[in-house]
Image (cartoon, rainbow, N blue to C red):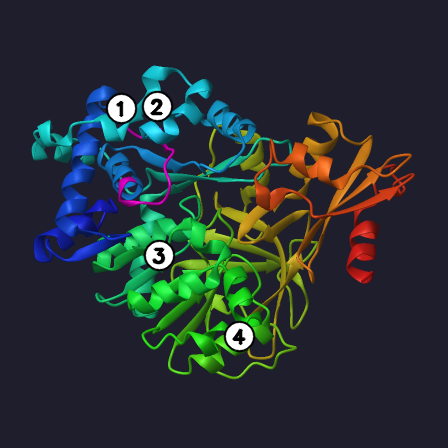
Amino acid sequence: MRTNILQYLAETFKTKPDKIVVVDGEKRYSIADVTIRSKKIGQFIAERTDRKIRRPVAVFLPKSFDCITANLGIIFSGNAYMNLDIKNPSQRLENILALVEPELILTDAQHADLIAPMVADEKIIRLDQVDFEAIQLDEKYIETILDRIIDTDPLCLINTSGSTGTPKSVILNHRSFIDFTEWANRTLEIHEDERIGCLSPVVFDIYSFELCMLMSKSATMVIIPESFAAFPVQILNLMVKEKINFIFWVPTIMVNIANGNLLQRIPLPDLRTVWFAGEVFPTKQFNYWRKENPNTKFVNLYGPIEITLDCTYFIVDREIPDHEPIPIGFPCRNTDVLILNDEDKPISGAEEGELCVRGSSLALGYYNNPEKTAAAFVQNPLNRSYPETIYRTGDIVYRNEAGEIIFKGRKDSLIKHSGYRIELGEIEHVIVNTLKLAKNGCVVYHTGKKEITLIYEAEKDLDPRNIRTEAAKILPKYMVPTKFIRMEELPRNTNGKIDRLFLKEKINRDE
């Protein structure tokens, strides 16, 4: 029985030390390269921290061989990695660092200046200034550290949006990633010759699973530069060049490729498997992909960040009309899905209800945030006999006649946009309370147009360019509103609060 995700890497290292598993530009790295560098980083961290374990260690690097080995090195040190987005505004980074208080921050000389004003200098490790050739690897030392780790210890922290302006840091453990990896390898048939088109940012859980594929199946991570995200043609050309046969993407870029009919110009003959998750994939654009790649297996996966990695899946094995949603399917192995109505009773028939999850896939909670943890990770209302935690996703779903789960929408103001999980209240907090750009504001999401809209109270129109510029100093680009509506007074409901439901329905109704 595996108790540590690195046991996969140890097994793979013994059998395929020379296999190339990371392609970073023109550079190629083998399993031996990855393992040895990661162990040296782990040993270096352990010595710097006096062998502390189960602590968060941050990484402030772009997706690269250095980032991959930094993450694995942190695990070798017995700690949990937390990747920071190098494009995030400084205020957001400061909020995360103040909440989590990582033991160290691994970066390089190029990026250290951005993070230096936020933390004590002794916490910053510039990896490109470490002489790894001089480090004498002590295998026994590493083994002694890992012997202290059990499968429920934290593996990584992933930051998600929070309603008060401070992101929440979700803690995921070894056991949950091992469970998902074992299930995925068997059920979805991951092969040892997978060549992954790695497009997801390092702050996504998809990236963390790509690491698991590397370790467990010696899959090759072909890093797609983040600068390519705005240029789908470059992505497709790289996929052809590198013979990519597996992708696990948020649908946004796939929709853009479909809308541009790019697969007609640049077909992908090697593409064998497509997984997608993170947001709804419009069926019309999905059908374009399926038509252009008739021999490819497509899998729709669903799961909030509080679940490792996803909790339901649907292998698309039939035609789905453009006007019908793609099911999110059925629970993954060792995961149970409860669909509860407003009275916390199981739904019947085609009734809608909130999707709740139980099982070892659950996150440990939110780091340094017991209140939010207690609100989201609650006692199973169907079990009064012993303690059993479920996670309430806030997503509304129902079952169709075939018993497949269908996603309907959000219960509250938490949305998924461009693959990111966003709390609309955080945007409001920044614009109204932090920047004081408007007296009152309500942020709503147009699900059809995928637009974040700010509705604000003001006597005269505010300059949208100024709002965007000021908001971008604190919020990441994907959270900055793109549409602005002024009202002399925002509508209120009977308890005096802004009537968000009315405004949301109005925005989604108006074209």
| Alpha carbon distance from label 3 to label 1 | 28 Å
Q: Earlier in the sequence, mark 2 or mark 3?
A: 2
Residue 256, horizontal then vertical, whole percent: 55, 65
State which tag comes first along the sequence, 1 or 4: 1
Q: What's the amino acid at mark 1?
A: Lys
Residue 474 falls within the magenta-colored stretch:
no
Q: Inspect the image, locate mark 2, and give the three-letter code of the amino acid beneath it.
A: Glu
Task: Using residue 293 as the reference point, say whether residue 39 is left or right of it.
Answer: left
Labels 3 and 4: the sequence-earlier one? 3
- Asked if labels 1 and 2 touch by Cβ distance under 8 angstroms, the answer is yes
The residue tagged with tag 3: helix, strand or loop? helix
The span from disc 2 to disc 3 (Cα, nearest Å) is: 28 Å
Near-viewer residue (73 or 265): 265
Regarding residue 12, the answer to whether it shows in the image is yes
Please name the residue shown 12% across and 48% down the image.
32
Report the Cα–Cα distance between label 4 and label 2. 48 Å
Q: Is residue 316 visible?
A: no
Q: Which residue is mark 4?
A: 261
- For numbered disc 2, what is the local secondary structure? loop
Q: Residue 180: which numbered mark, if any?
A: 3
Q: Amino acid at mark 4?
A: Asn
The residue carrying pointer 4 sits among few (fewer than 14), some (14 to 19) or many (20 or more) residues within 10 Å by Cα, namely: some
In the rendered image, residue 60, in percent from the top left (x then y), is placed at: 38, 33
- Looking at the rendered image, the quarter that the C terminus falls into is bottom right
Q: Give whichever of 359, 461 is nearer the camera.
A: 461
Q: Which residue carries the number 2 mark? A: 103
Q: Are marks 3 and 1 in contact (CB under 8 Å)?
A: no
The span shown in magenta is 52-66
C-alpha span from label 2 to label 1 = 9 Å
